[in-house]
Amino acid sequence: MQIIDGKATAAAIKQEIADSVKQLIAEGHRRPCLAAILVGHDGGSETYVHNKVMACEACGFDSRLIRFEDTVSQAELLACIDSLNADDGVDGFIVQLPLPAHIDKTRVIEAIRPEKDVDGFHPVNVGRLAIGLPGFISATPLGILTLLRRYGIDTKGKECVILGRSNIVGKPLSQLMMQKGYGDTTVTVCHSHSSDIAATCRRADILIAAIGRPGFVTADMVKPGAVVIDVGTTRVPDAGRKSGFRLSGDVCFDEVAPLCSYITPVPGGVGPMTICMLMLNTLAAARHEYYD
């Protein structure tokens, strides 16, 4: 069993990005710029955005953080998005989710210009992925595929089972893992209405858990020698920690790990790669790789 170290892999990729930025500057271009809109004071969102700002610094990017209280009107938020769309000094931007209940998340995502949608959530980018055209790919799915490639894990022709069908991870990941030239696997997606999930999981050469249910995947669900990717990051109360919680994945790591050929830990697996891929998408936006 080998642990897939997402933290070390992300650090190496960020250094590669930083080297590319130095080359861009040497050629007379400005630094890539990523902007983030943060609404409210959700603890998880605060942490994620802080980590994204730190990643920008490590990669040599400029960054902007735009904050709103959770009472912001939808019209005001959309006006901010319009201004970032029109700002030639911003290569890409994100609106940190979740948003308050009175904000229409779909309307917000659709308001972002596809060429600045470095989160890869806009329907245009989702559609381009579905039909095999280049575009921005959601950071978590792209991070998972990148980990598999960096560790030399052969995916072509393998059976891949994905637990979860969210718009952010499960659906785009199923497209990515199925696409010729990317995962090239045979994909099965399991969800809340799937029957005999355990039996389906036991067929998987590559099992990806992304349902947000701590410890859902147990040893009896894993085929010996399988590659297991744990996307879950649920905060579980833990009185023994200063923070009062610990991060738990969707996989019972201690009992599943001995069965695997490769497995990602939580934390330190997929999480660092998600932010790293956001940086990679921002670099691509600065280079106008997908849109003129």
Image (spheres, grey):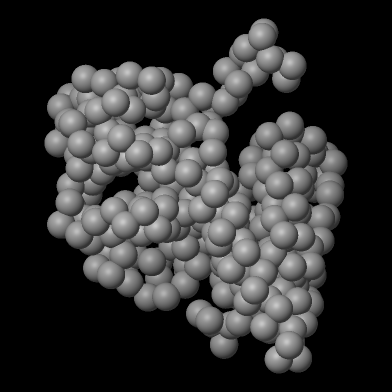
| 261 relative position to 54: left or right | left
Q: Is residue 273 visible?
A: no
Closer to the camera in the image, 30 or 254 = 254
Seen from the viewer's position, the closer of residues 206 and 97 is: 206
- Measured as percent of width and height from the top left, residue 170 is found at 38, 45
Image spot of residue 227 (x, y percent): 28, 41
Is residue 144 at least partly visible in the picture?
yes
Figure quadrant of the C terminus: bottom right
Q: Is residue 233 above or below residue 56?
A: above
What residue is drawn where x is 20% and y is 59%?
Answer: 156
Tell me if 122 is positioned left or right of 31 in this view.
left
Farthest top residue in view: 239
Which quarter of the picture shows residue 53?
Answer: bottom right
Give the position of the N terminus as an image quadrant: top left
- Against 177, residue 5 (above or below) is above
Which x, y percent locates residue 256? 31, 24
Question: Where, by quadrant of the figure, is residue 146 drawn?
Answer: bottom left
Q: Position of residue 155 (x, y in %)?
A: 24, 55
- Residue at 29% x, 26% y is 258
